[in-house]
Image: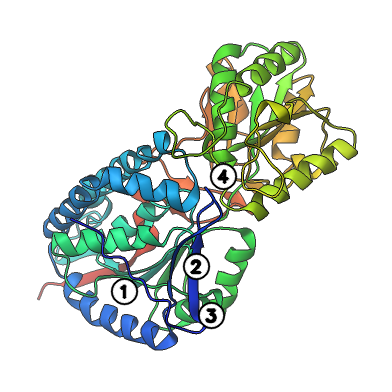
Amino acid sequence: MGLAIKQNADAPQEQVMRTISPIDGELYLQRRLDSRADIAAALLKAENAQKTWKRLPLEDKQALLLKALDALMAQQDDIAMEITQQMGRPIAQAAGELNGLKERALYMINKAPEALADIVPEPIDGFTRYIKREALGIVAIVAPWNYPYLTSVNGIFPALLAGNAVLLKHSHQTPLVADRYAEAFAAAGLPDGVFQTLDLSHDDTAFMIADPRVDFVNFTGSVKGGLAVQKALSSRFVAAGLELGGKDAAYVRADAAIDNAVESLVDGAFFNSGQSCCGIERIYVHESVYDAFVEKFVEMTKTYKLGNPLNKETNLGPMVRTSSADFVRSEIKKAVAQGAKALIDESLFPSSKEGTAYLAPQVIVDVDHTMDIMREENFGPVVGIMKVSNDSEALRLVNDSAYGLTASIWTQDHAIGEALAEDVEAGTVFINRCDYLDPALAWTGVKNSGRGCTLSVLGYESLTRPKSYHFKEI
């Protein structure tokens, strides 16, 4: 089953979407952006289709989505290549995204009967009472490029299972992801109009989500983007789920298993070139193990192979675009100018060059919270490591952030770790692991990391509204 790519460059320049591959900086794909007339047509189609879709028995919806999932997985190798070409993740790692998509999709499909079941209160003679979870209507999903399937599946599958129609606007960097979804749902036999995709400018995305027919917005992206979504919805009583990234922290206690912590945290900092909302960007290490930790961390970082992501031996690809790499370079230089020390000799990574998207991983020490490197989201392959003297100091620094997506504590004393976790201001707290989403747990954040949640049975709550039924027998 080949992918029929929408491709049309016969439009004014400002109406054309272009995808530049970070591998070589060349044009990978271009096509016409959808217009406001296209948005109106898609909304009308979705509105009509959803009226029938919501009445389809849940087991029928589950069966259709399982077929769609099978259709996606059948194209795993081709999709992995597209992920690499569009956003630069090494080909050796790209296929793993579809494995994660399958895990999450299956979990949400299997949990749907429990999550969407009627709520029946204690019986009262002469009355029938229950609460149904009613579909909202049309859900607009605005998805990012960094984990293009993993971020979007969190919203798409449960929204459809709950009885909603879905409009997906994917990133201009990864437009083929939306095409793959559309192809899979069509192959599975999903009714026409229940799932649709749109390629939109920022202004027209705001226009779409402001339309009164849109009943919920699922957005993953920057804080600036989240504020734009709220602004577009400001005149309506419509909720939005906002996953807005983080400055995720790790605390390595004196009793941590150092080798395990180093291996996991290096991966958590540099996988996907650090372009992960829950990637590790700052680490606090107890002074008694600080030197040993930093030495091992640096040595493991030096083993990474930066280069063309199409090469199977590469495990660190380019950042998504040159401007992103330039930003991280500037943040590193700024920190060094403020007194920090960069421990990785960039010459060890010959592919790392100014003016390209290829950037060597970097480890920064002698840092503090006056530096942006420890406060602002970098979204790149750089991590700051700071020495602390006790749990209280570590906890204060972990919480000294505008973000609160995830945090991790590394200790062999689970009782102490759990006690510390109670005071960590984050949506997810890990002990002895990091940078992972368990579909059975709510994916949520606090502070500037957003609001609402996806995954778990709780992920369905925002995709339905309660409707009470109260009947008196006569």
Say which amino acid is labelled 4.
Gln
Would you name the residue on which mark 1 appears?
137
Quadrant assignment, res 392: top right
Would you name the residue on which mark 2 appears?
18
| Mark 3 crowdedness (10 Å alpha carbons): few <14, some 14-19, many ≥20 | few
Say which amino acid is labelled 2.
Arg
| Mark 2 crowdedness (10 Å alpha carbons): few <14, some 14-19, many ≥20 | some
Q: Position of residue 126 (x, y in %)?
A: 14, 66
Left or right of residue 282: residue 16? left
Q: Element at badge 1?
A: loop
Closer to the N terminus: mark 1 or mark 4? 1
Residues under labels 1 and 4: Cα distance? Answer: 33 Å
Q: Element at badge 4?
A: loop
Quadrant assignment, res 267: top right
Closer to the N terminus: mark 4 or mark 3? 3
Residue 251 vs residue 277, the one in the foreground: 277
Would you name the residue on which mark 3 appears?
13
